[in-house]
Image: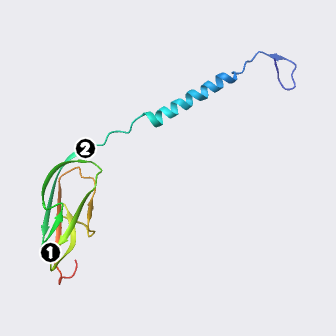
Amino acid sequence: MVFLCGSTEKTNEKKPSLWIKLLSAVAILAIIIGVLFVVPPPPPRYATANITITVEGQGSTYPPAGNYLDTWIVTENLYVTCYPSTGWRYDHMKRNGVEWTRDNPGEFLNLDENELIEVVFVKEEEPPL
């Protein structure tokens, strides 16, 4: 029996039992855990890329200069490391004709299309570009 404040009238309003509240909380928690831990992440996206590595000047690269048709994970990185010949030094790399990086090794991201990577070596007596 419940009395309202300042009232002498009785009300038949029933409140949910403690068990119903507890079961509701457990059900909500089970749904949250199921969503967080049971749903697997989406599989990686693969793409076939035709990657060509060329050398201007004298030196070598790893992977070696050549044409590579391969399947990559779309966000996977490709690193090209440059080794100048004696009397030459690494200057920069181009990606699809545009200067991309002066880092060695150079890093290329998002390999989901055809890529032309040009490695440029210059003679040691030439000033850097």
Position above or below: 117 against 121: above
35 left or right, relative to 47: right
Mark 1 or mark 2: which comes first in sequence? 2
Location of residue 124 (image quadrant):
bottom left
42 left or right, relative to 52: right
Residue 111, label in figure:
none
- Residue 47: give x, y in percent of width and height: 22, 45
Residue 46, label in figure:
2
- Amino acid type, residue under disc 1 in the picture: Ser
Please report the residue visible at 13 percent of the width from the left and 62 percent of the height from the top: 65
Circles 1 and 2: CB atoms closer than 8 Å: no
Mark 1: give few (<14), some (14-19) or many (20+) Cα within 10 Å. some
- Residue 4: give x, y in percent of width and height: 82, 23
Circle nearer the viewer, 1 or 2: 1
Residue 85, label in figure:
1
Viewer-closest of 123 and 87: 87
74 left or right, relative to 7: left
- Residue 60: give x, y in percent of width and height: 15, 68
